[in-house]
Image (cartoon, rainbow, N blue to C red):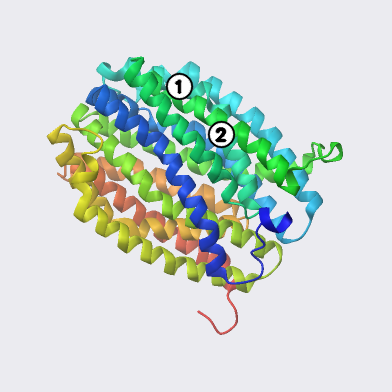
Amino acid sequence: MMKNKTRDMTVGSPVQHILLFALPALIGNVFQQIYNLADSVIVGRFVGANALAAVGATSSITFLFFALCNGIAGGGGIIVSQYYGARNHEKVRNCIVNTGFIMLIVPLIFGTIGFIFSPTILKLLGTPEAILADSSGYIRFMCIGLVFVSAYNYVSSMLRALGDSRTPLYFLIMSTIINVFLDILLVYVIKMGIQGAALATVISQFIAAITCAVYARRVNPYFKLQKSDFVISGHMSRKIIRLGIPMSLQFGLIAISGMAVQRIVNSYGTVVVAAFTATNRIEQLIHQPYTTLGMSLSTYSGQNYGAQKYDRVYMGYKKGLMIMAVLTAVMMLVMQLFGRSIVSLFVSDPDVISLGAAGLRITSLFYLALGLIYVVRGVLTGVGDAFFALFNGIVEVIGRFTIPLLMTKYMGFGEMGIWLSSGIVWVISGVTAWMRYYKHLHSRIKPAGTV
């Protein structure tokens, strides 16, 4: 059972471990994005471009609340992977318990804040009046379900830290199918509009959280918790929070910077908002191979760092860069050749399709920098570099607040500057991430005689 439901990455081929872990995680992340895609496609096709714009106007805000919660789960997952690599099974179980306790409280706090203040936040972002009411209703539904979304991500983080990327996938596929069915039922049949799409997501995430947790307890030895494991440790909680808060702040800062971009997007009207929403959903899919590669490297690095096998951490980093380069070449080619057809899946408006396709052609030129961010972040996060997560978020915030404004308002690129600025920010973040790796970690993990 131990061998079937966990993966020891401290021995064997780094490439094999990274790919075998990443593949189920990639499929799972793609299905996770199908939640958003289903909302966007069904709302855009069955309700209209304004409704699609209303969903898009909420993306940065909902991401902010999800990120603030999920960073804690990510921090707990890194600590679990390090204890697992060190073969400290008691600490693994205690970290799972303490992370769960924290993950019960945090979503309730942020969900309440989001529910109360979402209309005010939307107005501050300059959301067009025509979509303000729908956007506010959508956010409030998502805030109600924040605890369920966070619960699923908590269980998934714990399982993945133990090397099990398959179990979360099985239940995510199931809940995604339920989500699509409920989207069609609530949006198209019952005519609930975008609130129906939000309700479908909440219900399906609730099912994923409950079923995944029950199954994990039945089959994973580390989830067979006894009364003695339920000890709320101040020391353990501080470790989780110390690593989780910088990760939460990193994603939170990225979400806030996304709001700054959304404000600029909103200023160009509903056609640009709809095109940006469509390309944003597509870019979220593009992020998934990089995300899962980074996630795999994080677990791999955490286990080997906990086992003090630093040469294997370095090997994983080098192999991760090679895998990322191949992924980048494939995805760039797809976006250059088929971007227009992909955007047309979301909306039938020809102006929106043309603008979105042009945006994809621009951003795809910068995918290599995007991939570098995830590879370096995965390794640094795995070894517990809490500072980098926050630092990287700060760099991205500065870029997102300044570069889109320069591109669109002062350098004459107009609305196309929105997509160009995304690529430039990726380059800046990628370079600073690599600099942090080289200064903080490279000399400690590279074997003698390597560069």
Left or right: where 290 falls relative to 106: left
Q: Which residue is mark 1?
A: 199
**Which residue is more in the foreground, 389 or 47?**
47
Residue at left 63%, top 40%? 155
When asked about the image quadrant of residue 284, the answer is: top left
Q: Quadrant of the N terminus?
A: bottom right
Left or right: where 99 falls relative to 329: right
Q: Secondary structure at mark 1?
A: helix
Q: Residues within 10 Å of mark 2 (few under 14, many from 20)?
A: many
- Give the residue at the far right of this rendering: 228
Q: Residues within 10 Å of mark 1 (few under 14, many from 20)?
A: many
Q: Position of residue 181 (x, y in %)?
A: 41, 28
Q: Position of residue 380 (x, y in %)?
A: 56, 58
Kind of residue sitting beneath label 2: Ala
Q: Position of residue 332 (x, y in %)?
A: 28, 58
Q: Which residue is mark 2?
A: 208
Residue at left 22%, top 33%? 347
**Which residue is more in the foreground, 196 or 277?**
196
Q: Secondary structure at mark 2?
A: helix
